[in-house]
Amino acid sequence: MSRANDLLSKLKSSLPKPESSSDTQSQRKTVNQALQARNSLRESTLVSHAAGRSLEVAGDQDKQKRVPLCFSVYESDVRRLDEIKDFMRAKGYRNISNSEAVRLACRAVEIGDHFLHVYHKMRLEDGRRR
């Protein structure tokens, strides 16, 4: 038993001393400030546009900021993304990511009345009601 006590004593003396409460409070304050700065940046970066359905970058238009999005697509959409990536590969652009293919599609698409037909088909495929 005394050997176990000796080991525990050595372990206790080798561990760093606990931080004082002022150090801990200072660290909490720094972390809280960082979180507040991140949240205010996030709020100022994203501005709702057109009834909140799309996002636009606020501030300097010369510097576009990356806005991470997460969404689901169907197998037919993935096949279409693969077609875009295959086309770009055939033109000499290697390793096109899904994100790049989606951005390319968004920027290259001709917006018009044909969207209504496509949207109707999408809603039928989805099967949910809004």
Image: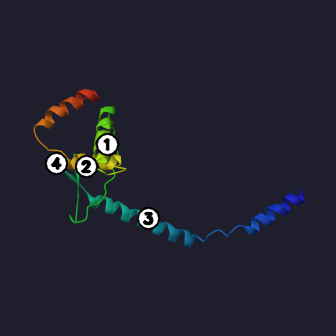
Q: Are marks 3 and 1 in contact (CB under 8 Å)?
A: no
**Mark 4 vs mark 3, CA separation in Å:** 33 Å
The image quarter in which residue 5 lies: bottom right
Q: Residue at x 13, y 44 (%)?
A: 111
**Mark 2 vs mark 3, CA separation in Å:** 38 Å
Q: Are marks 4 and 3 in contact (CB under 8 Å)?
A: no
- SS label for mark 3: helix
| Colouring rule applied to residues | rainbow
* Residue that numbered label 1 is attached to: 86
Nearer to me, 19 or 76 = 76
What amino acid type is highlighted by mark number 1? Asp
Nearer to me, 2 or 76 = 76
* Residue that numbered label 2 is attached to: 104
Q: Nearer the viewer, mark 3 or mark 1?
A: 1
- SS label for mark 2: helix
* Residue that numbered label 3 is attached to: 32
* Residue that numbered label 4 is attached to: 50
**Mark 3 vs mark 1, CA separation in Å:** 46 Å
Q: Nearer the viewer, mark 2 or mark 3?
A: 2
Q: Residue 37: x and y, percent?
A: 36, 65
Count of number-bearing discs: 4
Q: Residue 25: x and y, percent?
A: 52, 69
**Mark 2 vs mark 1, CA separation in Å:** 13 Å
